């Protein structure tokens, strides 16, 4: 492997250490219904998001609750000995993409047929650390000289 490729591979590996992600694939719910629940927790801190999902009556909320718990577990694996409360974890990104579509036929009157599209989706949830994000913003402001004093 060339040195340029090696350096970029090392940089990607370092960046992945601070990237806490969980994915949910082929969920048999329409993406539109899942996005309604995903929009509720986007940008929220982890603790209030968990309680909101737990007490929401929508079916997609149960699936996102488990996904958020999985992302928290992934964070704990990469940060042994640290507490979630001290690091101010929040839902940095959550995206709902369309998955595969099962096409079925529904009999209709007078010998016709209607298409039924059973949709599915893929959800990607990324956690962020508010403390680290604020430090990065401060470093970038001092480096570019954009201090507003």
Image (tube, grey):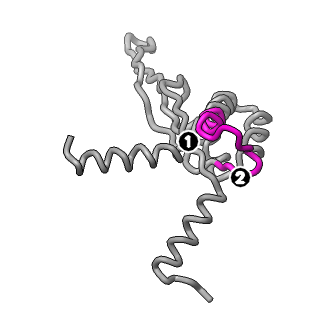
Magenta-colored span: 71-90
Is residue 47 depicted above or below 30 in this figure?
Answer: below
x 47%, y 26%: residue = 119
Image spot of residue 31 (x, y percent)? 52, 35
Drawn side of residue 141 relative to residue 104, left or right: right
Image spot of residue 23 (x, y percent)? 52, 32
Drawn side of residue 84 relative to residue 115, left or right: right
x 74%, y 44%: residue = 83
Q: Assign a secondary structure to mark 1.
A: strand
**In magenta stretch: residue 16:** no
Drawn side of residue 112 relative to residue 142, left or right: left
x 66%, y 50%: residue = 90
Q: Earlier in the sequence, mark 2 or mark 1?
A: 1
The N terminus lies in which quarter of the figure?
top left
Drawn side of residue 42 relative to residue 144, left or right: right
Residue, disc 2: 88
* Disc 1 crowd, CA 10 A, few/some/many (<14, 14-19, 20+): many
- Place residue 75 in its image quadrant: top right
Q: CA distance from mark 2 to mark 1?
A: 14 Å
Q: Which mark is residue 70?
A: none
Q: Assign a secondary structure to mark 2.
A: loop
The C terminus lies in which quarter of the figure?
bottom right
Q: Which mark is residue 20?
A: 1
* Disc 2 crowd, CA 10 A, few/some/many (<14, 14-19, 20+): some
Is residue 58 depicted above or below 79 in this figure?
Answer: above
Q: Residue furthest bottom?
A: 149
**In magenta stretch: residue 78:** yes
């Amino acid at each position: 492997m060339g040195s340029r490729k090696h350096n970029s591979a090392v940089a990607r590996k370092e960046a992945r250490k601070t990237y806490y992600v969980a994915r949910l694939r082929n969920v048999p719910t329409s993406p539109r219904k899942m996005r309604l629940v995903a929009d509720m927790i986007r940008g929220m801190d982890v603790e209030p998001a968990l309680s909101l999902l737990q007490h929401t009556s929508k079916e997609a909320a149960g699936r996102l609750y488990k996904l958020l718990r999985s992302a928290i577990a992934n964070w704990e694996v990469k940060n042994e000995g640290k507490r979630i409360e001290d690091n101010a974890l929040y839902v940095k990104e959550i995206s709902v993409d369309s998955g595969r579509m099962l096409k079925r036929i529904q009999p209709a009157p007078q010998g016709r047929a209607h298409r039924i599209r059973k949709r599915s989706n893929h959800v990607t949830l990324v956690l962020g650390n508010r403390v680290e994000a604020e430090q990065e913003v401060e470093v970038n402001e001092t480096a570019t000289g954009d201090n507003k004093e």
